[in-house]
Amino acid sequence: MDKFALTNAIYNVDCAYQKFFKEHAGYPKFKSKHDNHKSYTTNFTNGNIAVDFEDGNNYYKQKKKIASCHEKITNTRKDYLHKVSHEIISENQVIVSEDLQIKNMVKNHHLAKSISDASWYELTRQLEYKAKWNERKYIKIDTFYASSQICSNCGYQNKDMKDLSVREWVCPICGAKHDREE
């Protein structure tokens, strides 16, 4: 045991008993092996302890590293969105997307992080301006438009298709097969 640690232990015991007998502060409380609280005491002698707030930059270094990491993630996501939007615009003359109510969707706490990470708003924004640049037609349809219920061949609306667990259906009029994923 260090000479200073032993001296500090003696000072602490003396202080506890002085308070017990003179100030009636209650019995001294000894360190318990069940309590995980760690403590350290040192003695200030001849200027042996100093805190330098001008040079000890570890907090700012770490803050900079974290900011750099977040910036890299942001740039990676934006790059991916640009690539996806470019591919969609390049391969299609008409692009149709649903006008999503993202503000309402993030109220679901189980999906909020995933929805925010997907950056749907940014994707639709990029599709919109890239469609103008490349002279493509970009259409946003209403959230409640029954797009997965309408046959793309004949225009028949299958009103029985409200159940989202049904992923495929066949048009009773023209016989076209429809997949709700596409």
Image (cartoon, helix red, strand yellow):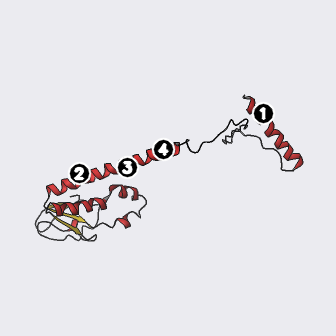
Q: Which residue is mark 4?
A: 62
Per the model, the C-alpha gap separating discs 2 and 3 is 18 Å
Mark 4 neighbour class, 10 Å CA radius: few under 14, some 14 to 19, many 20 or more: few
Residue 13 lies in quadrant: top right
User: Percent from the top left, x then y, of residue 132?
Assistant: 17, 64
- Position of 150 with respect to 123 (left or right) is left
What secondary structure is found at the residue carrying circle 3?
A: helix
Of label 3 and label 1, which has the lower sequence position? 1
Please state which amino acid type lies under the numbered disc 2: Lys
The structure residue drawn at horizontal position 37% and vertical position 49%, both measured from the top left corner, is: 71
Mark 1 neighbour class, 10 Å CA radius: few under 14, some 14 to 19, many 20 or more: few
Q: Which residue is mark 3?
A: 71
Q: Are marks 2 and 1 in contact (CB under 8 Å)?
A: no
Please tell me the numbered disc located at residue 103: none
Q: Are marks 3 and 1 in contact (CB under 8 Å)?
A: no
Please state which amino acid type lies under the numbered disc 1: Thr
Residue 91 lies in quadrant: bottom left
Q: Is residue 116 placed above or below 69 in the rendered structure?
A: below
